[in-house]
Image (cartoon, grey):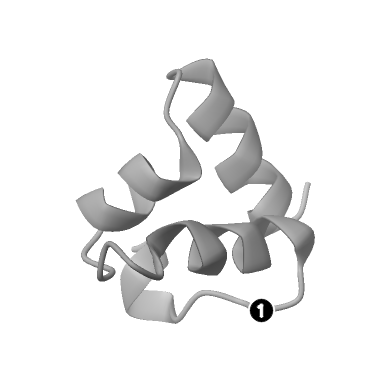
Amino acid sequence: MAIGERIHFFRLLRGMTQKYLGTAVGFPERSADVRLAQYETGSRKPKADLTA
């Protein structure tokens, strides 16, 4: 399972929105949901320090 699929799976499992999870990990509110969508679709990969 790719990292984006895992993020998506566990985010839904915990009932979180992309915006909520994105702001929880430190992204600005205005771009948090876009960044998480990019990770989940595989168009962007998270940096190693974010996934540790």
Of residues 20 and 48, the one nearer the viewer is: 20
Residue 26 in which image quadrant: bottom left
The residue depicted at 40 percent of the width and 70 percent of the height is 31
- 13 in relation to 8, above or below: above
The residue depicted at 36 percent of the width and 55 percent of the height is 22
Q: Is the C terminus in the top left, top right, bottom left or bottom right quadrant?
A: bottom left
Residue bearing mark 1:
44
Residue 44 location (% of width, % of height): 66, 79
Q: Amino acid at mark 1?
A: Arg
Residue 39 location (% of width, % of height): 62, 65
Of residues 2 and 17, the one nearer the viewer is: 17
- 29 in relation to 11, above or below: below
The residue depicted at 43 percent of the width and 19 percent of the height is 14
Q: Considering the numbered disc 1 on the image, is that residue within a helix, a strand or a loop?
A: loop
Q: Is residue 26 left or right of residue 6?
A: left
Of residues 12 and 5, the one nearer the viewer is: 12
Label 1 Cα neighbours within 10 Å, binned few <14 / some 14-19 / many ≥20? few
Q: Is residue 2 left or right of residue 7?
A: right
